[in-house]
Image (cartoon, grey):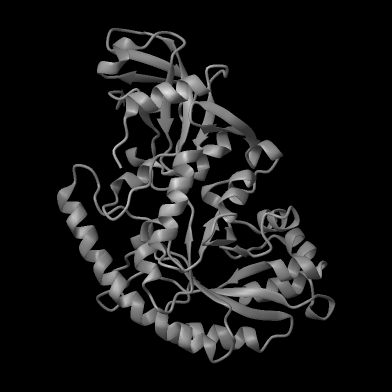
Amino acid sequence: MAIDRDKLRERLDRATAHLDPPYAVVDLSAFDANAGALTGRADGKPLRVASKSVRVRELLTRVLGRPGWQGVMAFTLPEAVWLARSGVSHDVLVAYPTAHRAGLAELAADPALADAVTLMVDDPAQLDLIDEVCPPARRPALRVCLDLDASWRPLRGRVHVGVRRSPVHSATAAGALAAAVAARPGFRLVGLMSYEAQIAGLGDAPPGQAVLGSAIRVAQRGSYRELLARRSDAVAAVREHADLEFVNGGGTGSVAATSADPAVTEVTAGSGLYGPTLFDAYRAWRPTPAAFFACAVVRRPAPGLATVLGGGWIASGQAASSRLPRPWLPDGLKLLGAEGAGEVQTPLAGDAADDLRVGDRVWFRHAKAGEMCEHVNEVHLVDGDAVVATVPTYRGEGHAFL
């Protein structure tokens, strides 16, 4: 969807004229539109919201109140416990294995909590740790989900395409781990997850890199075909040992493709709600930018340059320019290659710089979604040209889970 950046800037400036930068906003009309678009792409399969990509309880509750969304994928066990206890969801899947002993003890001591939170495992050693913290005779059965590695390993494994996650890659390995879980008291195997990061989290149309984009698309097609067969076989192998409640897959960048997999019963999405810059590199669907942060112009060091205070909100992942925030409003600004985005100041160049005055706002988009919220205690929710609510982020509620 084409965006009139001038009108958007005017609207955001009017809505937040009473605020002093830096601050973050979420445009509710874009957020809701993205939530609806993701539901449509899921083609009837439920969407589980990835809390890592949101990190605001009010917005997690908002999207879970919409048709087609159910359950949360949390990124740590303490976060999952907090979300379940605070009533955000009674279906919280922890996306990664945990070694958080206090969280495990709290989970094991509360049958209602144990029924709401599902742990992720990919190794019997993780089960051993849980038993060490809370022996099975002294706890309710804990819900567990197996993490099936979704990376593509062509040429007999000599090439690895994707991220390094679970050691469980084959259907045989998944079946063996399922048998091990089923044989142990104190555990209940309820799900299987596989995250195809090389499809869901990798843009297939990187700007100015046509050859790379073509190579990515070829790899993604090959990976998708291989995963369709392997995931189906893995689900069948696991179902020999447990009645699975769900098979989870995907992410914002692969909602439609993952939903088309008959073996998958639900799809995860989260980043698409905010529409960060990494998703500008996707052909199939690009979310409407909904999350922004504003910095104030504090100096004009030279013609064609304007400097804002702060701005260095860098995203995790491979250290590259793609992880830098992007000055977006007004249009026509760019970071300096020699300085990038700085913790205390960020100089900006471009035609628009000469029109900026000391005190004006520059609006940035973060490279990733929820990580923006690690820099602010609150997010201002904008509807039209007004701030309709100011709500705390995880950080604002006193939580730094990672």
| Percent position of residue 363, x then y | 42, 26
| Between 170 and 378, the one nearer to me in the picture | 378
Residue at the (19%, 46%) spot, across then down: 209
Quadrant hosting residue 376:
top right
| Percent position of residue 285, x then y | 32, 53
| Between 165 and 240, the one nearer to me in the picture | 240
- 2 sits to left or right of 269: left
Q: Is residue 205 above or below residue 27?
A: below
Q: Is residue 315 visible?
A: no
Residue at the (37%, 57%) spot, across then down: 253
- 23 sits to left or right of 150: right
Q: Is residue 71 visible?
A: yes
Work out which residue is located at the far left of the displayed protein and give it. Answer: 211
| Between 50 and 398, the one nearer to me in the picture | 50
- 400 sits to left or right of 386: right
Quadrant hosting residue 78:
bottom right
| Percent position of residue 193, x then y | 50, 71
In the rendered image, the quadrant that contains the N terminus is top left
Q: Is residue 195 above or below residue 17?
A: below
Q: Is residue 64 above or below residue 138?
A: above
Residue at the (67%, 80%) spot, across then down: 188
Residue at the (69%, 80%) spot, across then down: 187
| Percent position of residue 270, x then y | 49, 53
Numbered-mark total: 0
Q: Is residue 83 above or below residue 195?
A: above
